[in-house]
Amino acid sequence: MENQDNLGSNPPAKESELDFSKARGIWTGIREFVSELLNIQDDTDRETTVESIKKDISFKGHNAWILVFSIFVASIGLNVSSAAVVIGAMLISPLMGPIVGVGLSVAINDVDTLKKSFVNLGVMVGLSVLTAFIYFWISPVKEQTPELIARTYPTILDVLVAIFGGLALIVAKTKRGTIASVIFGVAIATALMPPLCTVGYGLAIGNWAFALGALYLFSINAVFIALSTFVVSKLLGFPLVKYANSKRRKRTAQLASTIAIIVIIPSVILFVNLLRKQVFETRANEFLTQVVQYSGAEKLRSSQDYQTREIEVFLIGAQVPEATIVTWQSQMQEIEVLKDAKLIVRQGASQAGDMATLSSQVRTGILEDLYVKNQEVIENKDARIELLERELLKFRRGDFSFVNLSREIKANYENVENLSFATMISTNFEKIDTIPTFTITWKNNVPARVKRADAEKMQKWLNLRLQLDTLNVRSLN
């Protein structure tokens, strides 16, 4: 019996081992497929990539003129707030060379290329800012457009564009047989060109806050593009530059590592801070939209300050009870990102100080909204009045197709020799009336009774044809 039991228990164990073997084979197949799909080591041309990047570093001749023209195009796009024009400028911009060169030279310990990259980076920045400055200085339009304002401070989206744009560029350039200078340079230009143009704009109008903010944004984007190049170059195992002097090689490696650390640490800290700020503002907006609601009260404006951790909302209408505000604050504390934030509710019927703050900060916005809405209503009414007047004057001033009408009269009344139309103004000394009048000249030898009959018949036809109650047909002979 014991042997039979043992024999009966063996098949399930074998089936379990078989299932495990199949699962392991499937997992191995998936892993190999993913590895082959994402592997870029085998198709990387390291020598050609290094030569291509070094070739694009220099800014002179054709590259310099292309940069100037592309900056002019981008400045025009920012000036008229046209994203399409700015994108067009990015297609021809050679901005990526020196920045990618910095990242590569640090990765492979190439001091000479690093020096050349920094020199050409300075030339690129100076030439770009000077070109933008000249354009905005001579341009008659110096309004602060949304496209310009958006480039005066860094956001997490700008950093992400720089990171993934840099990654796309360097990965594309390392692929064997790929020419990616123009195509993937667009991603680099997205992060670099508009800020440089905005620096020139700020200098041209004397707004240092604009210029410094845009320069700060450009610097952050440039750092992350270079950092992306550095990381990919290290991961792909680009060979280090060999020096005859071992001490110099060691000193160069230490210098490159120090530069990389100096760049990486502040960049990571900045990225984390921007990410936290973006998350704070997003969750604050969601909280204000979903939670801060009260029947009879309307939100006029709201703001969030990441530095002071304050969320401020202005309400008007019904007075929100203090207990409701306390409930809102309790719900806000339950949100991890907002647990240390302070909710400030300002409403019209509260303390005099809040009322004064409300009035001073939102009065202008309310008046602007009312003006815009009233202006739209007035414009709509004016358009309708103008349309009705045009329709009315079609008949009262003969704006109908007189040519077509005269052809119809000629076809139906062969005795008519001449036809004219005018608007007659008549009065009985009590009121003034405007009467559309057709004047007919008949052919010779047409009997008077035929003229009268045709005139009466024509008047009835014209009343129906033109849908007019008042109309006059006169005979001259």
Image: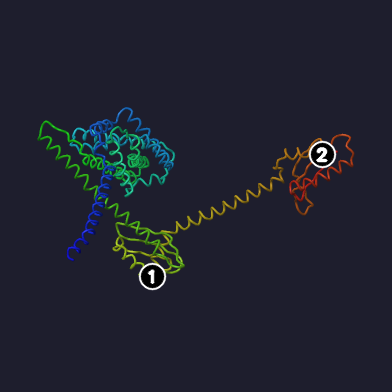
Does 462 sit above or below residue 336? above
Q: Residue at x 82, y 39 (%)?
A: 413
Does 51 sit above or below residue 13? above
Secondary structure state at the residue bearing disc 1? helix
Q: Looking at the rendering, in which quadrant would you find the C terminus?
A: top right
Q: Is residue 179 visible?
A: yes
Q: Position of residue 52 (x, y in %)?
A: 27, 31
Crowding at dot 1, Cα within 10 Å, few <14 / some 14-19 / many 20+, comes out as few
- The disc placed on residue 468 is none
Q: Position of residue 318 (x, y in %)?
A: 45, 68
- Amino acid on which disc 2 is placed: Tyr
Q: Residue at x 29, y 53 (%)?
A: 275
- The answer to which quarter of the image holds residue 246 is top left
Label 2 and label 1: CA atoms lie apart by 84 Å
Which residue position is annotated with label 1? 324
- Amino acid on which disc 1 is placed: Thr
Would you say 332 lies left or right of 423 here? left
Secondary structure state at the residue bearing disc 2? loop
Q: Position of residue 315 (x, y in %)?
A: 42, 64
Does 25 sit above or below residue 309? above
Does 292 sit above or below residue 273? below
Compare residues 427 and 348 and report the one nearer the observer.
348
- The disc placed on residue 413 is 2
Compare residues 438 and 361 and report the one nearer the observer.
438
Please report whichever mark, 2 or 1, sits nearer to the chain's N-terminal start: 1
Q: Position of residue 20 (x, y in %)?
A: 24, 54
Q: Residue at x 17, y 63 (%)?
A: 3
Q: How is the image coloured?
A: rainbow
Would you say 66 lies left or right of 242 here? right
- The answer to which quarter of the image holds residue 94 is top left
Q: Is residue 125 visible?
A: no
